[in-house]
Image: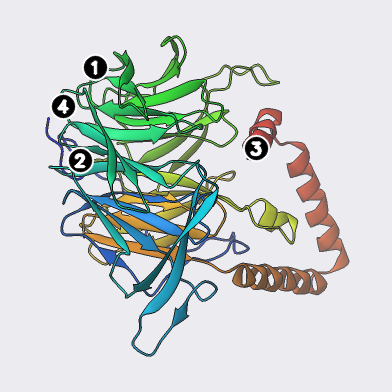
C-alpha cells in the first residue's frame, strides 16, 4: 500500500450521483461564505491545513502541509484586519502568544496574493498532517519520512524530531495540555510521545491496516483512532485499554476521525462518501440507546471513495443576535470533485457548496475551520490553498431579509390557513423523537 497526498490504494467503487442542485438550501438564514481575494500555493498536492487557535494567534493564521515536504504559514487578511495598498499587497501583524514567558511575539509581514509569511523546511519526504498546539505557537507534523517534528512557528525552526514508526506517519494531534503527541502510522500502530524529550511513551497495536486519523477527547483521558480496516476505536490514554470499537455497516475504510468539543460524539469520514456522527460518551441516553450509536449521517452531496478527505466542525462562537444564528453549526468537508460541502450539523441538510476548483478531478483533501471566526481554509491536489470568510453583518442581513419575507407571507395568508399551518407545526413539533432532541442538545459546545 502506498501513500501519496493522503491517498490509499484500493479498488475504487462507483461514485454516487451528485445532483446539480443550487449551492444553497432553504436554510437561508445561514451565513454564505465567499473566497478571499488572496490564496496560497505549494509545489505539490496539499495534504493538510490547520487554522491556528485564537488563543495563540490574535490574527487568523493558517498552516498548510504538502507532499512537497514543506509547511507554509499564512495570515488570513480580511477588510477588518489588514490594509491593502495600490500594489495589491497587504501588511499585517501576526501575533503569536508565547505562554512560557507571557510575551506576545509580533511579526510584521507584507503579504501578496500568493506568498506565505513563513516556510518551514526539514522533512525529507512529503508531509501528511499538521496540527497546532493549543498552549503556545508550536506545530507538529507527520511525514512519509517516518518521523514527526515539532516546530516553533515564530522562528520556523524544528525543535524536536520523533523517531520510532516503521512506516509513513499519517496523522498527529496534540493533547489538550500540549505536552503529549499522538500519532497514527501505516505501520498500523498508534504512538504517544513526550513533546519535550521526543521519547515514545506508549505504543498501541491499534489496527490491522494503516491508521488514518487520531484525536483527543477534551480532557485528554481518551483518544480515538480510525483506520483503513474500517474500525474506530476509543482508547484509555492512561492504561492503553481499548474501551470501545465502532464500525459502520459494510465496514467501509475510515478516512478521518474527530471528537466534538463536548467529547460526547466522534465525527468520522469513510470511503463510502459518508460522514457519520457517533455517540461515544460513557453514559447512555434517556431512551436507553447504546453508546457507539450513529445518530447523524451526512451524505449525498460530497464524494469520498479514494482519498482520506478531511472534514471539520464550524461552530458559531460569535455573539448571536437571534435563535437561528445561535444554532448555526456546520459540518464542513472536502470532496473529490473540486468542491467543499457544508452540512447543517443538526438537520444534516446541505447548506452550501464552495467551488474550490473548477476541475472536477481535483480532490479537496484538506479543510480547517477557525475556532472563533467564520473562516475556512481548504487545500487539495490542485496545489492551491484557499481561504473563505463570511461577515457577521452579511449573516444578520440574510437573516433579517428571511424573517421579513416570512412575515410578508404570513400577512398574505388568510386566517383559517394560518391557523391550520400553526396546528400542523404544533403536531409536528410534538411528535419529535425525544432521543433526537437530546442528541441535538448534547452536541452544543
The label shown at residue 167 is 4
Q: Bin the neighbour count of mark 3 within 10 Å (Cα to Cα): few under 14, some 14-19, many 20 and up.
A: some
Residue closer to the observer: 326 or 68: 68
Q: Bin the neighbour count of mark 2 within 10 Å (Cα to Cα): few under 14, some 14-19, many 20 and up.
A: some
What separation in Å lies between label 2 and label 1 (alpha carbons)?
Answer: 18 Å
What separation in Å lies between label 3 and label 4 (alpha carbons)?
Answer: 40 Å
Are dots 1 and 3 in contact, CB under 8 Å? no
Tell me which label, 3 or 2, sits earlier in the chain.
Answer: 2
Disc 4 element: loop
Are dots 3 and 2 in contact, CB under 8 Å? no
Asked if residue 258 shows in the view, the reply is: yes
Are dots 4 and 1 in contact, CB under 8 Å? no
State which quarter of the image contains the C terminus.
Answer: top right
Circle 1 is placed at which residue position?
A: 208
Tell me which label, 2 or 1, sits earlier in the chain.
Answer: 2
Q: Bin the neighbour count of mark 1 within 10 Å (Cα to Cα): few under 14, some 14-19, many 20 and up.
A: some
Q: Where is residue 425 in the image (x, y as percent from the top left)?
A: 76, 49
State whether residue 106 is above or below residue 5: below
Disc 2 element: loop
Query: Would residue 386 appear left or right of 435 to someone viewing this image?
Result: left
Disc 1 element: loop
Circle 3 is placed at which residue position?
A: 440
Amino acid at each position: 500500500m502506498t501513500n501519496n497526498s493522503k491517498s490509499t490504494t484500493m479498488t475504487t467503487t462507483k461514485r454516487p450521483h451528485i445532483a446539480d442542485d443550487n449551492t444553497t438550501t432553504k436554510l437561508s438564514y445561514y451565513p454564505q461564505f465567499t473566497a478571499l481575494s488572496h490564496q496560497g500555493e505549494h509545489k505539490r498536492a496539499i495534504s493538510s491545513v490547520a487554522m491556528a487557535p485564537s488563543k495563540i494567534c490574535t490574527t487568523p493564521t493558517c498552516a498548510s502541509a504538502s507532499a512537497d515536504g514543506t509547511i507554509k504559514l499564512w495570515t488570513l487578511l480580511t477588510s477588518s484586519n489588514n490594509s491593502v495598498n495600490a500594489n495589491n499587497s497587504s501588511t499585517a501583524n501576526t501575533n503569536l502568544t508565547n505562554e512560557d514567558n507571557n510575551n506576545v511575539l509580533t511579526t510584521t509581514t507584507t503579504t501578496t496574493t500568493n506568498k506565505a509569511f513563513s516556510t518551514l523546511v526539514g522533512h525529507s519526504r512529503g508531509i501528511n498532517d499538521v496540527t497546532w498546539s493549543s498552549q503556545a505557537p508550536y506545530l507538529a507534523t507527520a511525514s512519509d519520512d517516518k518521523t514527526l517534528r515539532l516546530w516553533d512557528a515564530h522562528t520556523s525552526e524544528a525543535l524536536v524530531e520523533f523517531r520510532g514508526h516503521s512506516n509513513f506517519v499519517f496523522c498527529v494531534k496534540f493533547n489538550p495540555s500540549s505536552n503529549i503527541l499522538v500519532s497514527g502510522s501505516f505501520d498500523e500502530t498508534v504512538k504517544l510521545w513526550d513533546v519535550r524529550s521526543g521519547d515514545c511513551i506508549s505504543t498501541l497495536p491499534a489496527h490491522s491496516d494503516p491508521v488514518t486519523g487520531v484525536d483527543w477527547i477534551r480532557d485528554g483521558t481518551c483518544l480515538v483512532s480510525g483506520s483503513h480496516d474500517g474500525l474506530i476505536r476509543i482508547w484509555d490514554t492512561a492504561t492503553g485499554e481499548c474501551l470501545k470499537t465502532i464500525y459502520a455497516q459494510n465496514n467501509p475504510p475510515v478516512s478521518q476521525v474527530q471528537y466534538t468539543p463536548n467529547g460526547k460524539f466522534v465525527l468520522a469520514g469513510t470511503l463510502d462518501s459518508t460522514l457519520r456522527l457517533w455517540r461515544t460518551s460513557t453514559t447512555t441516553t434517556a431512551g436507553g440507546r447504546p453508546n457507539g450509536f450513529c445518530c447523524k449521517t451526512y451524505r449525498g452531496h460530497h464524494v469520498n471513495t479514494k482519498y482520506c478527505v478531511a472534514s471539520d466542525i464550524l461552530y458559531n462562537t460569535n455573539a448571536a443576535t437571534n435563535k437561528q444564528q445561535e444554532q448555526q453549526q456546520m459540518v464542513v468537508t472536502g470532496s473529490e470533485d473540486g468542491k467543499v460541502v457544508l452540512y447543517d450539523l443538526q438537520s444534516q441538510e446541505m447548506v452550501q457548496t464552495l467551488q474550490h476548483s473548477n476541475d472536477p478531478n481535483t480532490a479537496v483533501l484538506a479543510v480547517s475551520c477557525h475556532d472563533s471566526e467564520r473562516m475556512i481554509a481548504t487545500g487539495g491536489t490542485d496545489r492551491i490553498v484557499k481561504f473563505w470568510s463570511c461577515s457577521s453583518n452579511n449573516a444578520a442581513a440574510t437573516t433579517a431579509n428571511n424573517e421579513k419575507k416570512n412575515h410578508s407571507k404570513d400577512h398574505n395568508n388568510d386566517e383559517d390557513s394560518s391557523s391550520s399551518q400553526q396546528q400542523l407545526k404544533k403536531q409536528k413539533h410534538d411528535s419529535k423523537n425525544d432521543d433526537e432532541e437530546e442528541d441535538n442538545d448534547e452536541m452544543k459546545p
